[in-house]
Amino acid sequence: IQRNILDYGASLTKIGGELVYITCSLLNRENKCQVNSFLFDNPTFEIVDLRYSWNNVIKSSKKYFGNDKYCQLLPNIHECDGFFIARLRKIK
């Protein structure tokens, strides 16, 4: 289901446009694995590094957690439910 959502969103994304993939899950198979598989199969997309727009995404004093380009919000760190966010830009 998750991959179908990504594929459908990608079909509607124009060159230079962004597809934002967000889940309310902590499971890698619904998050990181989906994004990595999608990028492997879709070389016309690249991931936008969220570390550089963290303050625009999260309005808090919490520092960016991790070294990944996508974001996993965790209840014990970010004081919210678990969420996953990845920004994907269509480059060609």
Image (cartoon, rainbow, N blue to C red):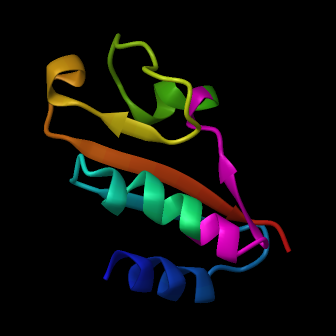
* Quadrant (top left/top right/bottom left/bottom right) for the C terminus: bottom right
Asked if residue 57 lies left or right of residue 37, the reply is left
- Is 34 rendered above or below residue 1? above
In-front residue for pair 52/68: 68
Question: Does the magenta portion include 4?
Answer: no
In this rendering, does residue 12 appear at all? Answer: no
- Is 48 rendered above or below residue 19? above
Residue visible at 35% across and 13% down in the picture: 62
Q: Give the magenta-colored segment's residue range.
A: 38-51
In-front residue for pair 65/9: 65
Image location of residue 26, percent across then percent down: 24, 46
Image location of residue 69, percent across then percent down: 59, 38
Q: Quadrant of residue 38?
A: bottom right
Residue visible at 78% across and 73% down in the picture: 44
Residue visible at 15% across and 20% down in the picture: 76
Residue visible at 52% across and 61% down in the picture: 35
Asked if residue 79 lies left or right of residue 29, the reply is left
- Is 78 rendered above or below residue 43? above
* Quadrant (top left/top right/bottom left/bottom right) for the N terminus: bottom left
Image location of residue 21, percent across then percent down: 44, 62
